[in-house]
Image: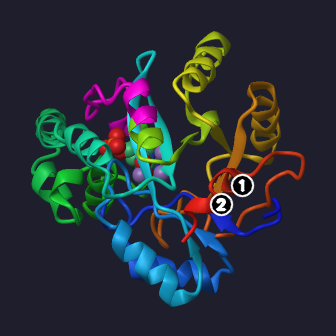
Amino acid sequence: MSSILNADLHCHSVVSDGTLMPEALAARAKANGVELWALTDHDEIGGQHRAAAAAREQGMKYLTGTEISVTFAGETVHIVGLGFDPDDPRMVEGLLATRGGRGARAQEMSDQLAKVGIKGAYEGALKYVGNPELISRTHFARFLVETGICKDTSEVFRRYLTDGKPGFVPHRWASLRDAVQWITRSGGVAVIAHPARYRFTPNEEYALFTEFKAHGGQAVEVVTGSHTAAEAVKYAGTAREFGLAASRGSDFHSPDESHTDLGQLPYLPGELTPVWELLAERIR
Ligand code: AMP
Ligand code: MN
Ligand code: MN
Ligand code: MN
């Protein structure tokens, strides 16, 4: 398959912090012309069988997916996994352990927000949660918009939920090595998600790509809803430099919040190896 393919290999459903069911996402992807789709919920694969069935129903090709939260050099990095076996116990147990800390973290976020006068944030966030194991900052953001404290979710992140702000609770996620190995040992390909989003020094970024490759990582998101055109060009260069394949995905969460809709982004640059070439055998 060539790089001219409407592949959308990054988005979220109610199984993590998206607002649509897997079936509704599949229908929306199809309507937007997506030819190859993957649902990549944060630290969760509970929607995979439903998503694959919905894709089949819509006549779309499908790859299994997830987006694993990792701590690297003191920063949270996201590693997308594609094409793995969703029933592989190493993947299932690894993600279960990763999800484990979210409940206590959410309680602590709520306690901190209470100290700056925002009461009941835990209960408020829970109303937006589809999967209790996956309570995330996004759900808090939706509650703070509902109360009128902020006008949109990006304002909530800026004022309350990022490092140094009152509702931010540092959290230790999976190691880079574990995340890459859960994916590769269950037959998938590991992908560095939206690399332009991390606040790394050039040395730290170099270390991320080097260690990722050493652990068996094979791809990087080049075209994503989180990259500008200039950032896509930059990371196309990084893909070539490190000999990584390239991925493409909207990172769609919600019709009301996401600026990039499913499948509505530029094609991959032609000179790169598309990640779906590495996964030809795993496409359903
Ligand atoms: P968590 O896994 O609980 O730390 O939440 C991370 C999620 O928050 C990401 O996957 C995004 O969906 C969302 N997020 C992070 N930063 C921002 C931001 N600046 N604006 C809007 N959403 C954000
Ligand atoms: Mn998210
Ligand atoms: Mn992400
Ligand atoms: Mn994402």
Please give the range of residues in magenta.
Answer: 159-181
| Front-most of residues 261 and 275 | 275
Q: Amino acid at mark 2?
A: Ala
Q: Is residue 200 magenta?
A: no
Can you identify the residue that label 1 sits on? 277
Q: Is residue 172 magenta?
A: yes
Q: Position of residue 185 (x, y in %)?
A: 42, 40
Q: Are marks 1 and 2 in contact (CB under 8 Å)?
A: yes
Rendered view: 149 above or below 239: below
Q: Position of residue 95 (x, y in %)?
A: 28, 44
Q: Secondary structure at mark 1?
A: helix
Q: Residue at x 71, y 45 (%)?
A: 246
Q: Residue at x 13, y 34 (%)?
A: 108
Q: Is mark 1 within 8 Å of ligand 4?
A: no
Quadrant containing the N terminus is bottom right
Q: Is residue 242 left or right of residue 169?
A: right
Separation of disc 1 and disc 2 at Cα? 6 Å
Tell me the number on the disc at residue 280.
2
Q: Position of residue 230 (x, y in %)?
A: 81, 41
Q: Quadrant of residue 19?
A: bottom left
Q: Is residue 76 left or right of residue 201?
A: left
Q: Residue at x 62, y 18 (%)?
A: 210
Quadrant containing the C terminus is bottom right
